[in-house]
């Protein structure tokens, strides 16, 4: 009987402990959304990589969500892409977040992608829509 009481009490205690480890801070939510995109790029999954993009998304040179998906599909046909995050800074104000990341992109062979794409910095603007963070804008930072 004593063991069953302990087992019964252990489940809620463990669940409460796991919940305490989970962060609901907006900054962490944005980082998690970004990490989901990064993992999808490395997996070669263009649909999953572009899922967090807002329908009004704008990228470099006016790229929209559909163009971003096509760009990734073409890239993944030619190359497996690795993404290493060197810097990931997030600042949240209300329902908007600005994120700056520095990335190193590698190709199938493990080598750096062409010089213009190998080490890049980006500024991302996110907006919370419902319970999800959606990527509104992605632009390269000046310099590597």
Image (tube, grey):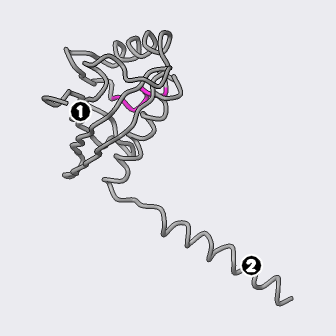
Q: Residue at x 27, y 39 (%)?
A: 101
* Residue placed most toward the observer, 88 or 67: 88
Q: Which residue is mark 2?
A: 8
Question: Looking at the image, which residue sits at the far left?
Answer: 142
Numbered label tally: 2
Question: Looking at the image, which residue sits at the far right?
Answer: 1
Q: Position of residue 60 (x, y in %)?
A: 22, 19
Q: Is residue 12 above or below residue 75?
A: below
- Magenta stretch: includes residue 137: no
Q: Which residue is mark 1?
A: 122
Q: Position of residue 45 (x, y in %)?
A: 51, 23
* Structural crowding at the residue carrying mark 2, measured as other residues with C-alpha within 10 Å and reported as few (<14), some (14–19) or many (≥20): few
Q: Residue at x 24, y 42 (%)?
A: 99
Q: Of discs 2 and 1, which sits in the foreground?
A: 1
Question: Looking at the image, which residue sits at the far bottom?
Answer: 2
Where does the C terminus fall, quadrant-wise? top left
Q: Residue at x 69, y 81 (%)?
A: 9
Q: Which residues are magenta?
A: 48-53
CA separation, marks 2 and 1?
49 Å
């Amino acid at each position: 009987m004593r063991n069953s009481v302990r087992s019964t009490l252990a489940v809620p205690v463990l669940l409460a402990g796991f919940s305490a480890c989970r962060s609901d801070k907006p900054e962490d939510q944005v980082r998690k959304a970004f990490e989901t995109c990064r993992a999808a790029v490395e997996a070669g999954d263009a649909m999953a990589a572009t899922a967090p993009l807002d329908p009004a998304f704008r990228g470099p040179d006016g790229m929209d969500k559909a163009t971003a998906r096509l760009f990734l599909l073409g890239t993944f046909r030619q190359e497996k892409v690795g993404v290493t995050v060197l810097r990931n800074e997030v600042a949240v104000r209300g329902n908007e977040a600005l994120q700056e990341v520095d990335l190193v992109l590698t190709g199938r062979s493990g080598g750096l992608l062409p010089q213009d794409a190998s080490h890049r910095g980006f500024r991302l603007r996110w907006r919370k829509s419902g319970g999800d963070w959606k990527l509104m804008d992605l632009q390269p930072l000046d310099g590597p």
